[in-house]
Image (cartoon, helix red, strand yellow):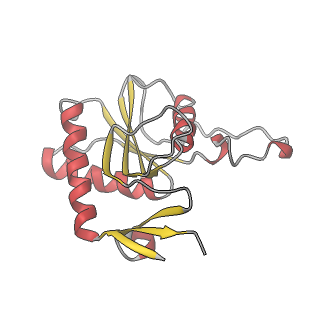
Amino acid sequence: MAKQIWDELAMKRALTRITYEIIEHNKGTQDLVLVGIKTRGVYLAQRIHDRIKELEGVDVPLGELDITLYRDDRHDASLKQDPVINSEQVGAEINDKNVVLIDDVIYTGRTIRAAMDALMDQGRPRTISVAALVDRGHRELPIKADFVGKNIPTSTDEQVAVKMKEIDKVDEVILNSLQK
């Protein structure tokens, strides 16, 4: 059973609010770098980037991060392969910058931990903050989002699905029950 939590307009409003909060928190856009976590975080980061450009007239650096090889819950150690680190992965200078990691849903905190590890292999940011469209709770690690579109309390047998036009041809947030 699926229930729509947000439609396109609600998502747009949340992203606008998150954008304002990021600007306020950083006291402007100087030394700000946005980094989207693949896949949907990249599209959210692009939207926040575009909104900052519209509001502030500034083209802040925008990067993307693939954290697959940094995940502790998905990496297969039996392959006996060292992760290949691409030094150009982020695509933006992050040393001594205020980096905002952006993802669609924050859940256990493991994705953000992996993203921080991947980011630190790229350089040494001054600060790292986290923006998520949805926070569904259930942390396994002491990590929190600094900027959240919506807190959606869920059970472990529910799933939050963020759909985006760039991939899914529609903007919405859906809560799915995994129970049969």
Residue 68 percent coordinates (x, y): 63, 48
* Number of numbered discs overlaid on the protein picture: 0
Q: State the image quarter where residue 173 is shown.
A: bottom left
Image side of residue 62 versus residue 156, left or right: left
Is 127 above or below relative to 91?
above
Q: Residue at x 77, y 37 (%)?
A: 82
Q: Residue at x 36, y 55 (%)?
A: 44
Q: Residue at x 36, y 27 (%)?
A: 97
Relative to the observer, which residue lies in front, 6 or 113? 6
The quadrant of the rendering that contains the C terminus is: bottom right
Is 3 above or below relative to 101?
below
Relative to the observer, which residue lies in front, 95 or 7? 7
Relative to the observer, which residue lies in front, 156 or 53? 156
Residue 69 percent coordinates (x, y): 66, 44
Residue 5 percent coordinates (x, y): 34, 67
Image side of residue 115 versus residue 75, left or right: left
Is 85 above or below relative to 169?
above
Q: Residue at x 40, y 73 (%)?
A: 3
Residue 100 percent coordinates (x, y): 37, 38
Relative to the observer, which residue lies in front, 169 or 133? 133
